[in-house]
Amino acid sequence: AWVTVAGGMQKTLSSLSPGDRVMALSGTGQVVYSQVLLFLHQDQQSWSTFLSLETEDGHRLALTANHLLFLDPHCRQDNSEYQAQFASRARPGDCVLIHTAEQQVHPSQIISVSLTESLGVYAPLTEAGTLFVDGVLASSYALVEDHRLAHWAFGPLRLFFSFERLLWGETAEEHHRSLLSKGHFRVFKVS
C-alpha cells in the first residue's frame, strides 16, 4: 500500500516513520499533510486476510475487515455525508472518497470487493485521524465503529505531541523516533 508524503513523493506504509507527513483529510474537509504520530499496528511478519476494494476509477485498497473506511451508498459529492464504517460493510455500488491530482476529493464507486491474503499489517495514527492509502480515504482507526469517538480517545496523545512540538520544535520528532526505535513509547497493539 502506498501513501503520498509531503513534497508529493510516494512511500509504502511499511517504510513510513513517525514524523512523516502523509496526505489526509482534515476535519473541515480539506486535503492536508498530516503528521504520523505512531503506529497503532505495525507487524511486518503477520499474514492476514484483507478485503480488496476496486473502484470505477481504478483505485485498489486492501484493508482488514474491521478497519474504518468512509462509505456512502448514495455517492454524494459532499464528503461530510460519508460515514466511517467497518470495511466489512463495503459493497459494490457504495462510494469511497478518492483524491485527485488537483488535491480535490471526489466519490468513486466500488465495483468489486474480494478477499486476499497478504503479509504485513500497518495502521499509522495521524494527527488528522485519516490518510489516503492508494488514493482512497481511510481512517487511522479500527475495532470501534465510531471514527469520532476513536479520534476523541486519542486526543490527549495528539495534544501531547502538539505541546512537545511547540516546546522543542523539530527536535521533538527526532526524540520520538529515538524513543519509538528503543521501544520506550508504545500505546498498544491492535490485532
Image (tube, helix red, strand yellow):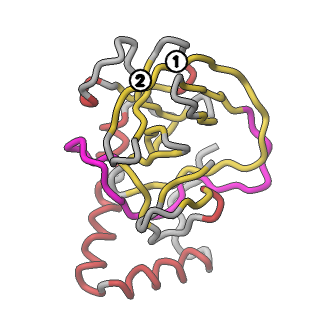
Query: What's the residue type where badge 2 is placed?
Result: Leu
Position of residue 106 measured from the top left corner of the image (x, y, whole percent): 35, 31
Residue topped by disc 1:
89
Q: Indicate left or right for 13 with 96 as reference.
A: right
Residue 11 lies within the magenta run? no
Image marks 1 and 2: residues in contact by CB distance under 8 Å: yes
Return the residue found at the far left: 28
Please report the bounds of the magenta region as a residue range: 25-49
Residue topped by disc 2:
71
Position of residue 127 measured from the top left corner of the image (x, y, whole percent): 34, 58
Position of residue 93 measured from the top left corner of the image (x, y, whole percent): 49, 11
Q: Is residue 68 above or below residue 30?
A: above
Q: Nearer the viewer, residue 10 or 143?
A: 10
Q: Residue at x 57, y 21 (%)?
A: 88
Q: Indicate left or right for 16 with 129 as reference.
A: right
Q: Is residue 155 above or below residue 178?
A: above
The CA span between labels 1 and 2 is 9 Å
SS type, badge 2? strand
